[in-house]
Image (cartoon, helix red, strand yellow):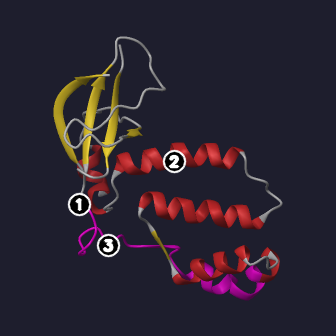
Amino acid sequence: MPIYEFYCNHCNTIFSFFSKSINTSTTPVCPKCKRSLERQVSLFACIDRSRQDSGAEDFPLDESRLEGAMTRLSSEAEKLNENDPRQTARLMRMFSDMTGVKLGDGMQEALNRLESGEDPDAIEAEMGDILESEDPFQPLQTRSRGKKSAPLRDETLYDL
């Protein structure tokens, strides 16, 4: 008897729904605002001290958001034509959009050039030093104005 998690973008809240059977197709509406919800990949709990000592809390990325993005991106990656650099650039942009991770300036320029149809080898030859010296992912701006905070978690267990 699974419990599914769904996210409401409007309420910025994660809700849990109980199902008496496996149900991967039903998408409920938000119990608060009645808008459509987005299925989330549920994380499991692991009780140990490794997170306390690892410094993982210093990386301000919502783990459930990253897990959901990786699940969606994996299905996109399966359809990827390795010989089309535009598709690779599109996949990187999707990753950035889904996770909120901002790509560095050099990476942005390289993706723009890939999307315009330039030869990947030429881009690497011209920008290799820049891309190697730059952290491709800029720090997240999770505390800046206009960004959502980590989602709330409704503790109620709803029926699916």
Q: Earlier in the sequence, mark 2 or mark 3?
A: 2
Q: Secondary structure at mark 3?
A: loop
Q: Nearer the viewer, residue 76 or 137?
A: 76
Q: Secondary structure at mark 2?
A: helix
Q: Earlier in the sequence, mark 3 or mark 1?
A: 3
Q: Three-letter amino acid code at disc 2?
A: Met
Residue 41 in the figure: left or right of residue 143: right
Q: Residue at x 82, y 77 (%)?
A: 119
- Pointers 2 and 1 in contact (C-beta within 8 Å): no
Measure the C-alpha gap from mark 2 to mark 3.
Answer: 20 Å
Which residue in the protein does label 1 denote? 149
Which residue in the protein does label 3 denote? 141
The image shows residue 1 at horizontal and vertical percentages of 35, 13
Q: Earlier in the sequence, mark 2 or mark 1?
A: 2
Q: Quarter-wise, where is residue 117 in the image? A: bottom right
Q: Residue at x 65, y 75 (%)?
A: 111
Q: Three-letter amino acid code at disc 1?
A: Ser
- Tell me the tag on residue 70: 2
Residue 13 in the figure: left or right of residue 77: left
Work out whether 42 lies above or below 151.
Answer: above
- Pointers 3 and 1 in contact (C-beta within 8 Å): no
The image shows residue 32 at horizontal and vertical percentages of 19, 40
Q: Three-letter amino acid code at disc 3?
A: Gln
> As drawn, which residue projects farthest toward the left?
155
Q: Please state the extent of the stretch shown in magenta in the rendering.
A: 123-148
